[in-house]
Amino acid sequence: MASTLLTVRELPGEGQRPWKGVDPYRGSGRRALRPMCRAGSAAQARPMIIVEELSKRYGAHQSVDRVSFRAVPGSVTGFLGPNGAGKSTTMRMMTGLTPPSAGHSTILGVPYAELPNPGRHVGVLLDASAQHTGRTGREILRLGATVMGLHRRRVDELLEVVGLSADEGDRRVGNYSLGMRQRLGLAHALLGDPQVLILDEPANGLDPAGIHWMRGLLKAFADRGGTVLLSSHLLHEIEVVADHLVVIGRGVIVADGSKADLLNAAGTLVRGTDPAALARCLELAGHAFTTTEDGAYVVEATREQIAAVAARHGVVITELRGADGAGLEEMFLQLTADDAREKVSA
Ligand SMILES: Nc1ncnc2c1ncn2[C@@H]1O[C@H](COP(=O)(O)OP(=O)(O)OP(=O)(O)O)[C@@H](O)[C@H]1O
């Protein structure tokens, strides 16, 4: 299937970048990232990442099985799955580090390996602990800046953006904590002012303040028109930051949709003053439901449908909301229950 969105020649070069000439730092106490203004809403709907039927087999083990999804600009796509589900393998295939057994993927319309000066278009953070431990953070960023043809000034800017002090920048990476390595990895991913970010578990090792900071950074990146693909098993983190969710279990995509749709699919929680009467009217209306431990019902119907049924039968409702009390975790555990190492009681 032809999926080319932009040819290499059409990729915005330095002189064509829409944000060229804008001073992104003016008026801000801390340095901000460059804005990524995008033309219209139609352009925003075009997927920047297309993964089609990607598969990876290691010997007899099928690690990734015909995985397909897309990520569009202006949004954060959360790539969720339990340990060993195939997230890293998929991302490694997308970024040319692992050859797929079948399928293909494109970023900005071309395979990652065909992007000219890829760091200028796609920021990748796959394994923060893989950085050279003998170099300082600043040296690693300077090397990256040289390879990408960037001014050295950019290194200082990015150290500041990710919250590493000048002193920390001059320390050897071998002496960095995991959280500091994640910040450095993120700085490296952002160095080339890319349009797309592919980040594998970037929150690992970050403290709560660091996770909060990163959440803001990724949201701001997406708000400026960037495309973010973010893998994690930190479900609450993803729930807060992602607009779109792709859930993987044992190498297979088990859910793919907007966060709102997937959470709504978890059903509606309703509680009434007379549970038996409420149950009867739900049955009469043909709405399937389950009972929670504390006597509420989780119903396969919208809030409006339930309210209408209750009103028709004169049943008093005391609580009516999306059944997302446990948020994404509940949905995630349900969707991956067959795949999880720890079995979850329904
Ligand atoms: N080089 C390899 N050789 C053999 N098996 C591999 C290799 N790389 C990954 N696998 C297997 O592929 C499966 C998916 O691993 P992957 O690292 O992609 O999972 P993940 O979803 O990123 O997990 P985690 O959340 O624990 O990082 C696992 O069963 C893993 O053991």
Image: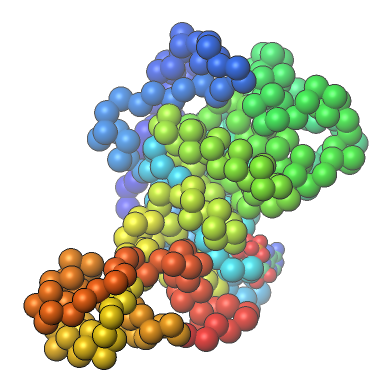
- Residue 321's spot in the image, x, y percent? 32, 66
Where in the figure is residue 162, as x and y percent of width and height? 67, 31
Q: Is residue 30 above or below residue 175?
A: above
What is the tally of numbered marks visible in this picture?
0
Task: Report the image quarter containing ligand 1.
Answer: bottom right
Q: Is residue 143 left or right of residue 68?
A: right
Q: Is residue 204 above or below residue 341?
A: above
Q: Residue at x 14, y 88 (%)?
A: 284
User: Quadrant of the rendered structure where residue 10 is?
Assistant: top left
Q: Residue at x 44, y 17 (%)?
A: 19
Left or right, 301 with reference to 141: left
Q: Quadrant of residue 256?
A: bottom left
Percent x, y of residue 328: 47, 64
In this rendered view, identify the residue nearer to me: 28 or 221: 28
**Residue reaching furthest to the left:** 312
Colour scheme of the rendered structure:
rainbow
For the residue pair 122 and 183, the one nearer the viewer reads as 183
Q: Nearer the viewer, residue 5 or 253?
A: 253
| Residue 265 visible to an observer of this rendering | no
Where 270 falls versus 286 (above or below)? above
Using residue 189 as the reference point, say whether residue 13 is left or right of it. Answer: left
